Image (tube, rainbow, N blue to C red):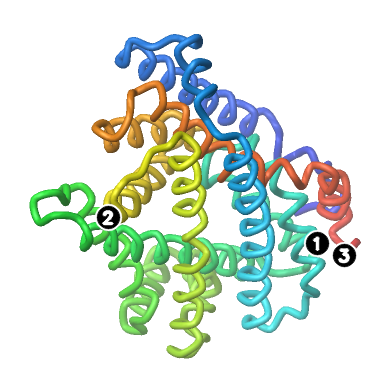
Amino acid sequence: MDRQESPSRGLGPQRLASTALAVGASVLALLLLFALLDLDLSSLEDSLERASWPLVAIAAILSAAMHIAGSTDKLWRVLSAMGLSLEWRQVLRIRLGSGPLRILLPVDAGDLVNIVFLKRSENLSLDAASGAILFDRGLNLIGTTFWLLAGLALLKAESPAPRAALLAAIGLSYGLFLFSGPLQRLAMAGARRVHHRVGRFVEGTLAPFQRFSAGRKLFFCAYGVLFQTRPLIVAWLLFLSFGIRVPAGELVAWITLSMFAGHLPTAMGMGPREAALVFLFSGAAPPAVLLSIGILLTLLVHALPMAVGLPWVPWYLRAMARGTRA
């Protein structure tokens, strides 16, 4: 990639189009939800007046602090384990600077920004940068799967949904792949059959999976479980702020399922996440209150922690454009 390339390339026409589509999908999903629930903005405003805003503020502060510190430390440990000598504060700036840019991209696609940054600014190969980010994100999937299974275990026998079991199976399959050398080698052999360049890329991407010991992988899995407590804590505080108490099993299982729904290609997952929360907790509170909680959950778990990094965006773009550490 040309080092003189403009830093705005990542936000070129194709990215802008995908962003517009993601935002449009979120707006459409929310409009459909309002129509299905027979709600309007005034009913949403009325429900928000019921909230205890000091509790909402506590949830916001906790969410931002846990996200920034946890995501920075997790990625720093992954990169360090791969042999990259980056200072913790450098990874912190990377996380902060990329946050607002990730808001502009469809959910999950924002990680492509950090892959490009690590390649250009930290001189990592594309496959190594992809492997670091893939491994880091995979830990979140393992953590989310753990909490989904824990929530389902706490529910009554008749409550778990088949779709929840399917999602859990996806997470467990990833965990199996993480620890299975033969499966990893099979994936690399299949990639080599496609093309030798594809094979080299997949081998580099899977380097952390191959290089890390089982003990180190278990440590990172536990880190992923701990990191994924954040949406559960925030949701619990939001329910409390509206004076609603829900059983632990329902809170853990249904919030985790709502977070899974937020991985559909929309802006920050907004729309699908709120819809899932409203219907899964349908007996706990009026629809307007549940929709308010869902919107606040998206803002506190995603928008706010990412927006905190706005002052670091110019540094991030300059460092990416120069292709050297700033």
Q: Is residue 283 above or below residue 72?
A: above
Q: Which residue sits furthest left? A: 158
Q: Position of residue 71 (x, y in %)?
A: 62, 62
User: Residue at horizontal 55%, vertical 68%?
Assistant: 131
User: Residue at horizontal 88%, vertical 50%?
Assistant: 315
Label 2 vs 1, first from the N-terminus: 1
Q: Position of residue 165 (x, y in %)?
A: 20, 55
Task: Using the numbered discs, state the Cα–Cα distance from disc 3 to disc 2 in whole angstroms.
Answer: 46 Å
The kind of residue on which mark 3 rests is: Arg
User: Residue at horizontal 52%, vertical 30%?
Assistant: 51
User: Residue at horizontal 64%, vertical 77%?
Assistant: 77
Q: Are marks 3 and 1 in contact (CB under 8 Å)?
A: yes
Q: Which residue is mark 3?
A: 325
Task: Tell which tag, 2 or 1, sits nearer the viewer.
Answer: 2
Q: Which residue is mark 1?
A: 121
Q: Is residue 145 above or below residue 34?
A: below
Label 3 vs 1, first from the N-terminus: 1
- For label 3, the crowd category at 10 Å Cα-Cα, with few meaning under 14, some 14 to 19 and many 20 or more, is some
Q: Can residue 190 be seen in this snapshot? A: yes
- For label 2, the crowd category at 10 Å Cα-Cα, with few meaning under 14, some 14 to 19 and many 20 or more, is some
